[in-house]
Image (tube, grey):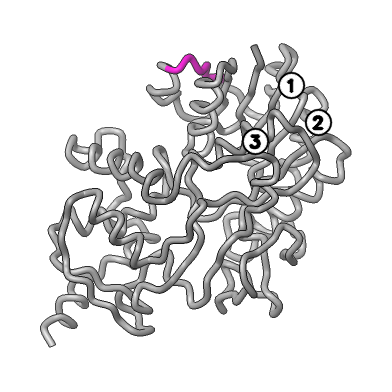
Amino acid sequence: MPHALIVGGSGVIGRAIALRLAAAGWQVRVTGRSRLPAELHTAGVRFVAADRADLRRELAAGADLLVDCVCYTADHARALVELAAEAGSTVLLSSKAVYVDAAGNHSNSDIEPRFDGPIPESAATMSPSNIDYNSRAGYGASKVAAEQVSLDSGHTITVLRPSRVHGVGNRRPREWVFVKRILDRRRSVLLRRRGSGIVHTTAAANLAALVETVAHNPGTRILNIADPDTPSALEISRTVARHLEHDWTEVLLDDQPLGRTPWDAAHPVILDTSAAMALGYQPVGDYATTVAAQLDWLMSAARSGDASAILPADDDPYFRQFFDYPAEDEFLRR
């Protein structure tokens, strides 16, 4: 029976990977700062209360696969490289935030990037840096630094670059911008840029399927991972409303502050996933199919009183920008 150790395994990505591998017959251990989610315990996954300094002890028992879901910096990557020597294959979770367009703009730039079609793994990236990875300028640059340390190590490490991850356990469930509107019984949904914005989505379940594929095909490489379709903000709003059986009027606006969503990019941001497909990876499903579990999870939390603090707080600075109801109502009264 193969063994896997997932570092940072209690979040949305680690949870999906652990469930996927456990269902395939793997013995799975996960580390994290929070306790094991109930569904992982039921699946036979074992929780290990350990930080990076303790992981060598955990690897002493052997691991066919090591997955690091919380590698953000070059220092994190150096610690991972030391551990990778003890594992059969290693996966590092990176991000599409590393990519830059021809002008050097990236996902967190003041100027939105403009890519010439789907982005391949060979596309230009930010320069590596040790700037605070929690900052807009530092996140992608720090991820690049982590990637380079890992790939230059000589160990069998696969870097995965997802985009706009969704799934159960997500600490930033972007679909909340529509779910909350439904809970608040809003009869209209306003969409900037007429809802045409596309920022590729990645189901945690699809990412987990690729991790399993990589586990059986070890290698040193970079792979994009995203859903097989590329829904626009309008299509995402319709998917959420349809799943939750809610009817509303779509108000399609031009480029203005009202109607903002996490997907209203001025130019499409789409990942080329052909390299992953060439390995034999098969997606679990498209966006509408895979996002359903997250929508049900959010609704369950809302209806039960959110005892586990799953839902974003009303004053969450990220989500607050999407819920200017007074301004929307004033616009609709005109």
- Residue 82, numbered circle: 2
Instruction: Find residue 299 and report its image quarter.
Output: top left
Q: Is residue 8 above or below residue 249?
A: above
Q: Position of residue 284 (x, y in %)?
A: 48, 39
Tell me how far mark 1 sits from mark 3, CA to CA: 14 Å
| Label 1 neighbour load within 10 Å: few <14, some 14-19, many 20+ | some
Residue 225 vs residue 120: left or right?
Answer: left
Q: Which residue is mark 3?
A: 68
> Which residue corresponds to the image point at 76% horizontal and 64% vertical from the top-left?
127
Q: Mark 3 is on which residue type?
A: Asp
Quadrant where the C terminus is found in the figure: bottom left
The three-letter code of the residue at mark 1 reads Arg
Mark 3 Cα-neighbour bin, 10 Å: few <14, some 14–19, many ≥20: many
Judged from the image, the secondary structure of the residue bearing numbered disc 2 is helix
| Residue 139 seen in the current view | no
Q: Nearer the viewer, residue 224 or 63?
A: 224
Residue 274 location (% of width, % of height): 66, 53
Q: Position of residue 3 (x, y in %)?
A: 65, 17
Tell me if label 3 and label 2 are in contact, CB under 8 Å.
no
Q: Which residues are magenta?
A: 43-48
Q: Inspect the image, locate mark 2, and give the three-letter code of the amino acid beneath it.
A: Glu
Q: Is residue 264 at least partly visible in the picture?
A: yes
Q: Residue 56: give its label.
A: 1
